[in-house]
Image (cartoon, rainbow, N blue to C red):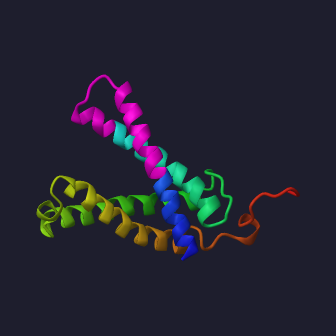
Amino acid sequence: MLQYSRFLLVGLVVGLIAIFAREWIARALPADSPLFYSISVVVVYAAGIVLSFALHSRFTFGTHLPFSRTERFAPFLAVALVGAMATWLISITCRYAVGFDKLFGAVAGSVAFAVGAVAASILTYILNAHMVFHHVPPEQNRLPGPDS
């Protein structure tokens, strides 16, 4: 449970950084259009995946893996994309099929997204713990210390 708590905390930190970064990038773009909005989301999401990998490697799962270790980063990327799809599907379902608009009014979109993100985090935590970080060889599973 402690590891999942760290997983959620890292996700929250990365999420907040992503929100501020997207706003900053949006202000630097020439227009506020669907195209430029999409560009800002994709750029920030990609940066968020890299930051998540670094923070989850170190703080959630206690490993120190360089980004060049594609045998870990590629599955992490795949899990992140699965998480994005799960978040979207759960959010859409909550908002429109469950009726969050009637229940929560003006904040229905945000509430639906939060429910989707937390629900998807359970899935992505399990996938990351078992598919990405679980089988790290012992020599790679040490954090650098004073003797390294």
Residue 131 horizontal side relative to residue 30, left or right: right
**Residue 103: image x %, image y %?**
15, 65
**Residue 72: image x %, image y %?**
58, 61
Which residue is at the front of the view, 107 or 125? Answer: 107
Task: Magenta stretch: give its range.
Answer: 14-39
Residue 9 horizontal side relative to residue 35, left or right: right
The residue under the point 59% across, 55% down is: 55
Q: Residue furthest left?
A: 102
Which residue is at the front of the view, 4 or 137? Answer: 4
Which residue is at the front of the view, 99 or 127? Answer: 99
Which residue is at the front of the view, 115 or 30? Answer: 115
Q: Residue furthest bottom?
A: 1
84 lies above or below 2: above
| Quadrant in the picture for the N terminus | bottom right
**Residue 74: image x %, image y %?**
51, 58
The residue under the point 47% across, 48% down is: 48
| Quadrant in the picture for the C terminus | bottom right
Q: Residue furthest right?
A: 147
Is 52 a magenta residue? Answer: no
Per the picture, the main secondary structure of the magenta-coloured stretch is helix
Is 25 a magenta residue? Answer: yes
Residue 61 horizontal side relative to residue 14, left or right: right
Residue 60 quadrant: bottom right
The residue under the point 41% across, 32% down is: 24
Residue 23 quadrant: top left
Residue 24 horizontal side relative to residue 57, left or right: left
32 lies above or below 77: above
The residue under the point 35% across, 42% down is: 41
Image mark count:
0
Residue 135 quadrant: bottom right
